[in-house]
Image (cartoon, rainbow, N blue to C red):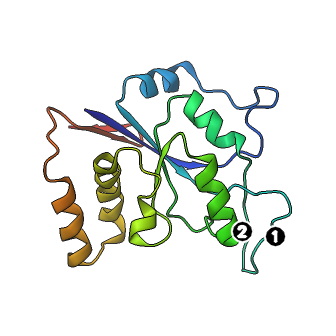
Amino acid sequence: MRINFFGDFVSYSPLFGNDLLLSGDLKELIQCANVNVVNFEAPVKSEGSIAISKSGPSLHQGAESAVWLQQNGFTVATLANNHMMDYGEEGLAATRKALSSLASLGAGTWEEAYQNCLDSKMCKLVDYFQMQIIQPSKYELYNLIRSIDTLQFQSTEIISNDNQYN
């Protein structure tokens, strides 16, 4: 099994005018993987929603961003980032709705974080890789590993910053 992890994705209107295009090499990389994970860096802004008061910019993107990701081979969107709540609960709800055709994880309570996860074991595996960075409590990590311990892989490749690890 091959899993690709990509960084932050924000696009205000990716479907208009084909402004957002992938290189041939990147398309090939995406097509060769079973799972393509991307960080959906900003919430979907619904009409009339207002940004929360905070320091720094409040980012948002259109619902078309989720459609573009699916059309281009992305399968999992992670939501655990510093902008996901820029438009409050309304923005998170609009984001989950827009991402309904993709697996998404990482925002809300523990249960909510996997609410829109089409393959919960795969999403928990992806979350496990992410959690290596934030160092969860032993209890959280134990529960996560217990929930994915039945997954078996012939081969796993992780690609990051042009380095490949087997």
Q: Do the numbered discs 2 and 1 sit on residues whose CB atoms are within 8 Å?
A: yes
Q: Closer to the N terminus: mark 2 or mark 1?
A: 1
In the figure, 52 relative to 147: above or below? below
**Mark seen at residue 87:** 2
Secondary structure of residue under mark 1? loop
Q: Position of residue 65 (x, y in %)?
A: 67, 42
Amino acid tagged 1: Ile
Look at the image and tell me in which quarter the C terminus lies: top left
Secondary structure of residue under mark 2? loop
Where does label 1 land, which residue? 50
Look at the image and tell me in which quarter the N terminus lies: top left
Residue, x 67% and y 57% (percent of image)?
94
Q: Tell me: 79 left or right of 5.
A: right
Q: Position of residue 112 (x, y in %)?
A: 45, 65
Amino acid tagged 2: Tyr
How many residues crowd around disc 1 within 10 Å: few (fewer than 14), some, or many (20 or more)?
A: some
Give 160 or 150, whichever is nearer the viewer. Answer: 150
